[in-house]
Amino acid sequence: MIMSESMQSSVGISLTADVLIIGGGPAGTWAALSAANEGVKVVLADKGYCGSSGATAPSGTGVWYIQPDAEARLEAKMSRYELGGQLAENAWMNRVLDKAYERMHHLAELGYPFPLDGSGKSVVRGLQGPEYMKLMRKLVLKAGVKILDHSPALELLADEHGVGGARGVRTQTGENWEVRAGAVVIATGGCAFLSKALGCNVLTGDGYLLAAEAGAEMSGMEFSNAYAISPSFASITKTAYYRYASFYYEDGSIVEGAGSQRGRSVIARNLLQGRQVFARLDQAPEEIRPRLRVGQTNFFLPFDRLGIDPFRDMFPVTLRLEGTVRGTGGIHIVNEDCGTAVPGLYAAGDAATRELICGGFTGGGSHNAAWAMSSGSFSGKGAASYAKSLGTRSSERALKGLSTSQLTRQETSTGGKTGDIVEAVKAEVHPYDRNLFRTEQGLVSSLERLDQLWKEVRATPITLDNRAYKFREAAAMTATARWMYRSARFRTETRGMHKRVDYPSLDGSQRHRLISGGLDEVSVRTEEVSKEVVLA
Amino acid sequence: MIEIVSESKCIQCNLCVSVCPTNVFDKVEGDIPVIARQSDCQTCFMCELYCPVDALYVSPNSEGSDLVEEELLEENGLLGSYREKIGWGPGRTPITRHPLMLEGRN
Ligand SMILES: Cc1cc2nc3c(=O)[nH]c(=O)nc-3n(C[C@H](O)[C@H](O)[C@H](O)COP(=O)(O)OP(=O)(O)OC[C@H]3O[C@@H](n4cnc5c(N)ncnc54)[C@H](O)[C@@H]3O)c2cc1C
Ligand code: SF4
Ligand code: SF4
């Protein structure tokens, strides 16, 4: 048989494993290590490069690392409990605090270069992204895990018993890849809607779409409108140091009420009116400035390159959407292994909901990093034992692809449409007056357009070439926006980061989770939050 | 966005091609890599950190392409400046070990 060139190049890789991890950020790499530790065969596929890709690698993270001391732990648990609208759960917070504490000490043992105290002992501190993720890649390889870089997953494979692998393309060769596995962990990060927030353009909600196509649900998708302060000209959405900022108009007068925590709305309202807001870190005491420069080198990078002194010069700022990356919504988890409702399918990190530990308040700054390492660990172990329980049967399964859009080897005109769909979704989710300040009217009109867009996405066949994942990203963002806004419409109150202009206060009767799901038809239902209240 | 692959410095190791999360570069047989899809660049600076010879320059402007001159960057000590700051490269200590890391909240 004579094969056409495109057929030849698409033959690609076919592998079998016990556990397949999709996504190689902190959650995916911890999942890979934990699964490998159970003695099973693990493959990890990343859209970019495991070690540099995702939100943590270029950013770095403060970690919810709390000494196992009752008082300190209680304080830590209470810190976001009210802010998060009482949606966190005590038992989950305890598990995550324990696991993150353990993992941070493992990192010290495994070679993360923490600073040393006078006696030469490692002192655990926040993690610098490049260093952390370089180490994680090394450890994953050492554990015998096979890594497929530049290999976005395009669809899950399943039979009537559940999920059994995934399929994708290799963007640097155009080949297809397929991994058959007893269990799959989705660790694809959150969705920041291509806003150019630091490291986030690979985070387009792909895992949500994959999971939903297999029948899994989402939770807390109304908590998806985290916006980060950043210089308007740069990608550095590092927000911690804005606690030292004053905010000004161009003429040097103060923007009343603007601030890095609660005052972000004030910044947003000014930007909406076309008034540029400027920041200057003039409240940082002179003596701590050298320490700030050491603590977050990337924060200062754009300023240094442009000759700006952020402590003395005013610079223009904007708010970049980080969606569910620093929001908390994600795949609904139904057990302590971070399993979903679909057999064989697990979720970890930003791909999963983080309401369990921080409710509807942001997971940024500490909780997300702790969640990534602990949920990665739980899911990797859980997936490994599930895969073991399947025995050898898994290799004989008749699996089929689950993509809602048809994936084909034929030429299509899909490529040309991708940009339009991406722009259309961005136009619904980026604007502050739609997503930050939500109203019934705004949500309804956005949903009308997004539903229409989904129909178009659904009807478009995708050519399986090295750009195929771009269209799947557009599809995932469309689906994500629809779960977000359906949930936001359902929650007729203001809770956590979800702000309804038409329902500005918290409604005690809505202290429940919103579980959303479905693709052609999106639905939302409520689910009770554990009654076990965190008591001060 | 990524602006420069220095012809005079690049040793054609293609590490940047491997580590770029958004696959901006293309490898070229017997030559230095090309910036093939600049508009996909997410301004994450990771390629710069991995380049062993400081041959790359990522402009902090994430919103559009800038005109930059290699000579000027070199003069201002900007090539490889991020890698130096985080303490990557032979003979350097990772900044994560800096004694100031022990103080206050970072
Ligand atoms: C600027 C910034 C600062 C932050 N600071 C903090 C902080 O101080 N403290 C804190 O707790 N949290 C912080 N966060 C949040 C934190 O970075 C994330 O919660 C964390 O990175 C989540 O880890 P993850 O592994 O789930 O996802 P990520 O690290 O985002 O990794 C996801 C991976 O999945 C891959 N992927 C995506 N789609 C596919 C696909 N289809 N197929 C295969 N692979 C795919 C991506 O390439 C990526 O490698 C910050 C976030 C940002 C943006
Ligand atoms: S990493 Fe640096 S030296 Fe290596 S190919 Fe890229 S530019 Fe050249
Ligand atoms: S800055 Fe990041 S996205 Fe841009 S070329 Fe370098 S590694 Fe790739």
Image (cartoon, coloured by chain):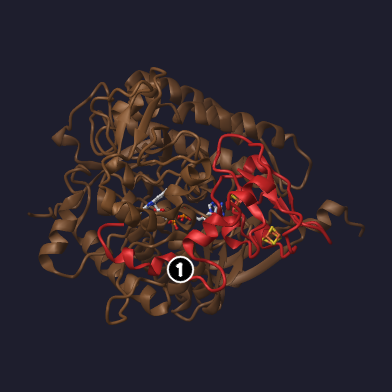
Chain colours: A brown, B red
Q: Residue at x 71, y 32 (%)?
A: A416
Q: Height in image: A385 above or below A525?
A: below
Please rate how many residues cluster around mark 1, counting C-alpha atoms within 10 Å: few if below 14, some from 14 to 19, many from 20: many
Expressed as whole percent of the image width and height from the top left, the position of residue A424 reads: 55, 27
Q: Nearer the viewer, residue A341 or A136?
A: A136
Q: Name the side, left or right, on which B70 lies relative to A30.
A: right
Q: Nearer the viewer, residue A519 or A373?
A: A373
The residue that disc 1 covers is: B94
What type is the residue that disc 1 sits on? Pro
Q: Height in image: A189 above or below A20?
A: above
Expressed as whole percent of the image width and height from the top left, the position of residue A481 reads: 45, 35
Where is residue A96, by image quadrant? Answer: bottom left
Expressed as whole percent of the image width and height from the top left, the position of residue A338 reads: 36, 61
Quadrant into which the N terminus of chain A falls: bottom right
Q: Name the side, left or right, on which A451 lies relative to A87.
A: right
Q: Is residue A344 visible?
A: no
| Chain letter, disc 1 residue | B
Where is residue A471, by image quadrant? Answer: top right
Q: Nearer the viewer, residue B76 or A86?
A: B76
Assign a secondary structure to mark 1: loop
Q: Residue at x 68, y 39 (%)?
A: A461
